[in-house]
Image (cartoon, grey):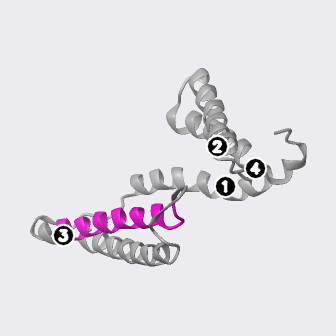
Amino acid sequence: MQRAEIGCAIALLLLSGVTAWEAMRLDIGWGDIGPKGGFFPFWLAVLLAVSSLSVIIKALLSAKNQSLKPFLTRKQALSVLTVLLPMALVVPMVETVGFYLTSFLYLSFYIWWTGRQVWFVTLAVSLLFPIIIFLIFEKWFLLPLPKGLLEPYVPF
């Protein structure tokens, strides 16, 4: 398990380096109207790098306590697939039916399937999330999110 942790942390460390490098090309400073293009990606890359380094250090320091248990058990793999497969369906759905309908459908299905919540909670979260995201991005930030093929029929 130690090799898997170190390998994953090194891959994330490399990703954070590339992200920070590209963010610096966009300028990581603060402009007249707020943060410039690379500000948030740069600081997220720094956080990812610090986290990756802490995982590497922890894995190296705990090398003596490592057992031969597998990195990923069958039960854990099923848990990963429970998250991965619905998310894999979300990507093409955003392009076809748009972000808002996709997020409603995804949350409705996922909360019901994995959380086994009552219908009221499922419906409330599934409706409130797209509405709040709409208000924040479309109304407050004036940034339209993808509406997919349904865009000509969406009144807002």
Give the Cα separation between the discs numbered 2 and 1: 9 Å
Which amino acid lies under the numbered mark 2 shown in the image of this protein?
Tyr
Q: Earlier in the sequence, mark 3 or mark 2?
A: 3
Quadrant of the image occupied by residue 127: top right
Which amino acid lies under the numbered mark 1 shown in the image of this protein?
Leu
- Residue 92 in the image, given as x and y percentages of width and height: 72, 59
The residue that disc 4 covers is 98
Q: Quadrant of the N terminus?
A: bottom left
Q: Answer yes or no: do the residues labelled 2 and 1 have beta carbons within 8 Å?
A: yes
Disc 2: CA contacts within 10 A as few (<14), some (14-19) or many (>=20): some
Q: Earlier in the sequence, mark 1 or mark 3?
A: 3
The residue that disc 2 covers is 106
The residue that disc 1 covers is 89
Q: Secondary structure at mark 3?
A: helix
Foreground tag (3 vs 2): 3
Give the Cα separation between the discs numbered 4 and 2: 12 Å
Residue sitting at 36 percent across and 64 percent down? 48
Disc 1: CA contacts within 10 A as few (<14), some (14-19) or many (>=20): few
Judge by depth and name the residue closer to the eye, 70 or 58: 58
The residue that disc 3 covers is 57
Which amino acid lies under the numbered mark 4 shown in the image of this protein?
Gly
Residue 64 is tagged as: none
Disc 4: CA contacts within 10 A as few (<14), some (14-19) or many (>=20): many
Q: Quadrant of the C terminus?
A: top right
Q: Earlier in the sequence, mark 4 or mark 3?
A: 3
Quadrant of the image occupied by residue 109: top right
